[in-house]
Image (cartoon, rainbow, N blue to C red):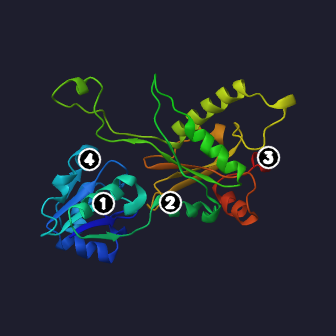
């Protein structure tokens, strides 16, 4: 049997009782390590589960999936995912690979950032398409996610922005060599995400100036209200509501971070709940 088990968002104890019992009975247990991470680290997970974990990086999951699924038709193998198993398309692909091999599969769900964002008070059924904000470099600065944010705003929907992480990413130089060398891990902060969004806002403003100096109804501006979240589900969780320009200077501490762009017509209950996380200026909405 091949199990894909969600770990939740906070610490080792967020595992479900069902998931924990399965882990302790499995012959091999893999920990997916590149789409998300837990604040506690691998050692604390191993101590709590009473099981040695095999770290599964992007290369293993995407290029050596057969290694993970080996003998799973006759022994029990678990694949552990931070959040919920279906939080990333990679895990769906892994399940399909198992079924192609005739291996029985079982999914153990858990909380993910997709529903835990409700902790800030914004109502889940008011969220539109989730977007990912990737790290930029000197030559690659994609901004298509901005158009999706604008589309959500036009439909009166909030946008959850998942921020990029880089774990065990090979350096450009090492790609030309036989021996891989890796860059240090990087986790995008709400400050970095806000900075990239502000650069897009500035570029869009130059190309598409508002008619007669009037603000467009469904665009981002420096004083657009945004919500920053850090380490959701952990005891050190942080939430801050402020303007986009203010978020650029914010330090919410260690990863993981997420950013929300609320719609311009918040429900009174959403406003009341958000007020505990920062001084809200009604003009920002």
> What element does badge 3 sit on?
helix
Q: Which of marks 1 and 4 is nearer the N terminus?
A: 4
> Is disc 3 in contact with disc 4, using a CB cutoff of under 8 Å?
no
Indicate which disc, 2 or 1, sits on the residue closer to the N terminus: 1
Q: Nearer the viewer, residue 204 or 190?
A: 204
- Residue at the outermost right position: 212
In the image: residue 236, left or right of residue 247: left
Image quadrant occupied by the N terminus = bottom left
According to the picture, the residue beneath numbered tag 1 turns out to be: 96
The residue at the point 30 percent across, 50 percent down is 33
Query: What x and y, as percent, mark residue 49?
Result: 23, 68
User: Dots 1 and 3: beta carbons under 8 Å?
Assistant: no
Q: Are marks 3 and 2 in contact (CB under 8 Å)?
A: no
Q: Toward which corner of the image does residue 17 lie, by quadrant?
A: bottom left
Residue 25: which quarter of the image? bottom left
Q: Are marks 2 and 1 in contact (CB under 8 Å)?
A: no
The residue that mark 2 highlights is 114
Question: Is disc 2 placed on a helix, strand or loop?
Answer: helix
Q: Distance between the residues labelled 3 and 4?
A: 45 Å
Vertical placement of residue 268 versus 260, above or below:
below
Q: Position of residue 151 (x, y in %)?
A: 66, 46
Q: Nearer the viewer, mark 1 or mark 3?
A: 1
- The Cα–Cα distance between marks 3 and 2, rounded to whole angstroms, is 28 Å
Q: Which of marks 2 and 1 is in front?
A: 1
Label placed on residue 57: 4
Q: Do the residues labelled 4 and 2 touch (CB within 8 Å)?
A: no
Find the distance from the CA under tag 1 to the CA under tag 3: 48 Å
Question: Going from the N terminus, do you reach mark 1 or mark 3 first?
Answer: 1
**Badge 4 or badge 2: first in the primary sequence:** 4
Q: Distance between the residues labelled 1 and 4?
A: 19 Å
Can I make out residue 10 in this image? no
- Residue designated by label 3: 283
């Amino acid at each position: 049997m091949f199990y894909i088990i969600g770990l939740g968002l906070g610490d080792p104890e967020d595992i479900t009782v069902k998931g924990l019992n399965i882990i302790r009975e499995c012959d091999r247990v893999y920990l997916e390590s590149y789409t998300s991470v837990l604040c506690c680290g691998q050692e604390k997970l191993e101590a709590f589960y009473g099981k040695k974990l095999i770290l599964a990086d992007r290369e293993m999951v995407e290029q050596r999936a057969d290694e993970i699924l080996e003998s799973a038709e006759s022994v029990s193998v678990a694949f552990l995912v931070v959040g919920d198993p279906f939080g990333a398309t990679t895990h769906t692909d892994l399940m399909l690979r198992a079924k192609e091999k005739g291996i029985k599969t079982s999914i153990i769900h858990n909380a993910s950032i997709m529903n835990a964002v409700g902790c800030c008070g914004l109502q889940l059924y008011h969220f539109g398409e989730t977007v990912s904000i990737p790290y930029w470099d000197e030559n690659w600065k994609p901004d298509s996610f901005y158009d999706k944010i604008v589309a959500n705003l036009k439909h009166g929907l909030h946008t959850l922005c998942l921020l990029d992480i880089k774990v065990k990413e090979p350096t450009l130089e090492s790609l030309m060599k036989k021996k891989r060398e890796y860059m240090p891990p990087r986790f995008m902060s709400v400050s970095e995400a806000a900075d990239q969004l502000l650069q897009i806002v500035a570029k869009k403003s130059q190309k598409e100036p508002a008619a007669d100096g009037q603000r467009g109804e469904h665009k981002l501006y420096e004083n657009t209200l945004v919500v920053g979240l850090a380490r959701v589900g952990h005891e050190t969780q942080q939430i801050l509501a402020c303007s986009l320009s203010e978020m650029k200077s914010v330090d919410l501490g260690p990863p993981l971070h997420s950013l929300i762009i609320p719609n311009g017509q918040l429900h009174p209950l959403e406003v009341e709940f958000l007020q505990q996380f920062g001084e809200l200026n009604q003009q920002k909405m």
